[in-house]
Amino acid sequence: MDGERPATRRAQPPVADAAHSVAQLADEVARLREELARQHLLSLAAGVLVDRYALEPADAAERLVSLAEDTGQRPEDFAADLLNQAVGPSPAVATAAEPVGASRRVRRTGELAGARESLDEVAETLLSEALGPLGACGVLLWRRSAGDCLELVGGAGLGALERTHWRWIPPLWPGPLRRVHAEGRPLWLPRGPTAPDRLPGPSEAAARAVLPLRGDQGPLGVMLVCWPQPTELAEDLRHEVLMLSQVARRVLSAAQRRPDYRSCGPLSLPVLTSLLDVLANPALLVHSPSGDGEPLVEHANQAARRAGTGLLGSVPRPLGQLLPYAAPLLRELIARAQETQAVQIEAQLPAGRRPGEPGTLTNVRVLPVEQERTAVLWHPGGLDHSSSALRVVGGLAGLGAFEDDVAAGTSRWTEHTFELLGLALDAPPRPLADLGPLFEPEDARALAGAVRRLMNRQENVTLVVRVRRPEGGLRQVRIIAEPVLTDGALTGIAGIFQDVSAQHRTEVALEATFDQLTTVREQSAVRHRLALQLQQAIVPEVPDLRKLPGLQVAARYRPAGQEYRVGGDWYDVLPLPGGPVMMAVGDVAGHGIEAATGMVALRNALRGLALTGEPPARLLGWLNEVALNTSGQPTATGVCAVYDPARRSLVWASAGHLPPVLLRGGTAVMLEPTHNILLGALPESTYHETVTPLRAQDTLFLYTDGLIERRDTDLGGSLTELRDAVQALDPADVAEQADRLLARSTGDTEDDTSLVVIRIL
């Protein structure tokens, strides 16, 4: 062949140790990147503590770990929460309140994704750290090219064949990916795209989200998220997915700012890679920088990925990482091809990923395609029945291996395969396509369909079949099979049989247990719903307050977080005989139906005791005895006050509760209570009261701790923030002030909240 001359055969260097070292170094680099991302997250959070509390950096780091331990969280999760609270919600997404878990996942995922080397690894991080917990099964990232094409640059969870099909999206393609890219609005498809639109995914009806990725200079690309089946994409899920798309946008924008080693002269990289993709034989595109730099594999076609040579990892990647055995000789061939501009040929090169692993690259050709770029092509090894793979698998408990020769119609089995399929050792091995009579009829039909896909589409297949045991009963056997290709043609089928009967029995037991747990959970949900209805009936969100003498009153109740659903907060405003008005707020410790039951007992008891006309201190003393003698012995804090409209005086007592806030003439102050013990703690406790004169237009705020408590702020700081929030309220009707304060002062401890606002007329 003109321009071709065989390369001189050199003695093969000892590459096993080098390959092992490369694998170790790659693992170490991945661990270091992840640890760097974690340390970066902790350092940012420690910086917040330094700024907020004027701590030394070392003290801030220790304080961060201590706070995480106190709240039962990992330091990195606590750091993500702290940073989210410091910077607030992302302005690029909806303004609804972000759940703590969602914010934490997004912050942690952003830090980890920023430390990844390739966009495939970024997509894998998005899927494993955040989208997977939301039920998603795949994610793809397209980047806008200089020619306005959308190029698939990263993905996880979807097959290589699907990724090849969607590699390039031309500018005039009318599908949803181009529409979202052009319009800049996300597209939510709970039941998949409607005809004639098409999108990658596990099935036509599977849920998808198509999200635009936009930078400062305009559109960057598109992100696609897939779910395994039709899924109702709730508002909070959409909100978190939108936040994650901002993570992808930042990484994609940063990658676009880096120098593009792929820019080339006469032939563009898309043209080169497209040429390699149409080849039936394995092929690589390798970039070899001038000097002694390590050759970089820029692209591997599907045949190379199927050839079992370690190329299943993401590219670009150094040649020594993907083909550690063959790399030393390939470097020489590549250098000679670039120097002579002639095709270099080698009869055979090793291709194992790990020391001792079989596999060869035969009839290797290295072609110079342009300056600093070469194409590496080879033939994969044919169906080799002499390999030791069958013997290795045969030594593993519960596994049997097989290799079918399609042309000869024969098969080779390991010894354990006969036992798994219930056949005698002297029975002739059968090809996979002929095993249907050994299985249940339904499974035989499934096997026939799998074999058709394997042979016609060259797809890997996995299925579980039922085999009748000689002693009776059924054995559950998993079959994993893949095509063996030679020069792009199917020459064999290889795979394993695995006994999964024990796993099947475990799954059946787990399903029964899950059904029981589901029943218990549904009963618990009914119990909590009834308790919540009871609580709302007793403490309505918008109370029916009658016109009270000399007062305007507004009261609000906000239930606890979704996890608990019901809490123990209450309020009450009750006109008394003769003109006085009793007003109270209280908080029973704990959550759930027990707290709601205790709240009902104490609130109703206080209403009855107040009709005696006794002062608040005496009422709290009696209420303390009620708590001690109530089932479950609840403990509670509370404020009880009696307002005399004739004297404009407030007589009040506190049982370990938060201080009321008085707004007078635009200035808010805390009313310091006399320190009394909480209700239900000790018998025969004595309570002391305070008298506070009031004026016309004074406004009094009684509340529970759900209004102010935050995990990252001490009680003093929370009270100061509340006082400032009250002082910042515009003069308005008390109902409007109550709504504004409830919306502005949001605690984050999953506690319920009661608020009473009273204005003196």
Image (cartoon, grey):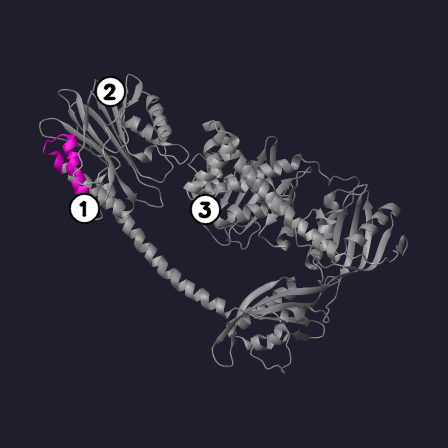
Residue closer to the observer: 23 or 366 = 23
* Residue kind at label 3, given as amino acid type: Leu
Work out which quarter of the rendered image holds the N terminus and state it. bottom right
Judging by the rendered image, the residue that carries numbered circle 2 is 698
Determine crowd level at label 3: few under 14, some 14-19, many 20+ residues with C-alpha closer than 10 A. some
Across and down, in percent, residue 274 comes to: 72, 49
In space, the residues marked 1 and 2 are separated at their CA atoms by: 37 Å
Judging by the rendered image, the residue that carries numbered circle 1 is 630
Mark 3 near mark 1, Cβ–Cβ under 8 Å? no
Q: Looking at the image, is mark 1 or mark 2 earlier in the sequence?
A: 1
Q: Which residues are magenta?
A: 608-628
Residue closer to the observer: 652 or 573 = 652
User: Quarter-wise, where is residue 756 in the image?
Assistant: top left
Residue appearing at x 63%, y 67% in the figure = 495
Residue appearing at x 51%, y 46% in the figure = 130
* Residue kind at label 1, given as amino acid type: Thr
Judging by the rendered image, the residue that carries numbered circle 3 is 233
* Residue kind at label 2, given as amino acid type: Asp
Residue closer to the observer: 653 or 600 = 653
Determine crowd level at label 1: few under 14, some 14-19, many 20+ residues with C-alpha closer than 10 A. some
The answer to whether residue 141 is visible is no
Question: In the image, is residue 227 part of the stretch drawn in magenta?
Answer: no
Work out which quarter of the rendered image holds the C terminus and state it. top left
